Image (cartoon, rainbow, N blue to C red):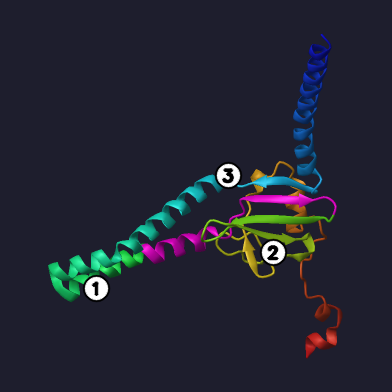
Amino acid sequence: MLSQRICKVSLTATRSNTFRQGCIAPALIRFASTTDGQEKIYTGSLASRMKAVKLFSLTTSITGAAVQPTLLEQSMKVGGTAMAIAACGVAGFFTIVTPLLLHFVTKKYVTELYFNKKTGEYTAITISLVLTRQETTFKPEDVTVPEVPGMFTSFEVNNKSLFLEPSLFPDPEHYVKIMGYDKPVDFKLNLTEAQDPQKSKK
């Protein structure tokens, strides 16, 4: 009887410890995800499609590079050197140029944007050529808005162009702050000559 009671007590203790661990573990994970100070404030609508397209393009490029020797050999047998050069040129174009062109267009697109309340910094996530995450950390004072924005360019940070969709911000104040719309407007009027009539006569 005494052994059965001891077994019951140990079993109850084991279950309670397991229950406590099961409750504490998610809480710790939740706590770790919020203590870093990063808050997601923006998600690009084309992020998943862009990743899928770039993955497909990268896969076809690797496959095309792998079959280049076979294509060259078969083209030499069928049409000689001219045929081989033409076939390899077309295949090489789609193997190399297409991923580079796609990356040139999509490298500015911000898939995610985080805000650190402690430091007041923003972290923009973009996709590299090989589908890795690239982080660009900046503050609103580091942002330069070009007078004539380029293609898929909202602003620049250290000569790096980034593109955001204003309508996707749940809190538009972040977009206003990043773009500097909360600052006084500088109309860049040349008032020095108007104030000095002697210089204007000269």
Disc number lying in front (1 or 3): 1
Cα distance between the residues tagged 1 and 2:
46 Å
Q: Amino acid at mark 1?
A: Ile
Q: Earlier in the sequence, mark 1 or mark 2?
A: 1
Cα distance between the residues tagged 2 and 3:
22 Å
Q: Amino acid at mark 3?
A: Ser
**Residue at x 18%, y 70% (from the top left corner):** 83
Cα distance between the residues tagged 1 and 3:
41 Å
Report the disc number at residue 161: none
User: Where is residue 9 shown, x and y percent of the image?
Assistant: 82, 17
**Residue at x 71%, y 56% (from the top left corner):** 123
Q: Which residue is disc 2 drawn over?
A: 145
Residue 148 versus residue 19 in the image, above or below = below
Q: Which residue is disc 3 drawn over?
A: 45
Element on which disc 2 rests: loop
Q: Which residue is disc 1 drawn over?
A: 85
Q: Are there few (<14), some (14-19), or many (20+) residues within 10 Å of tag 2?
A: some
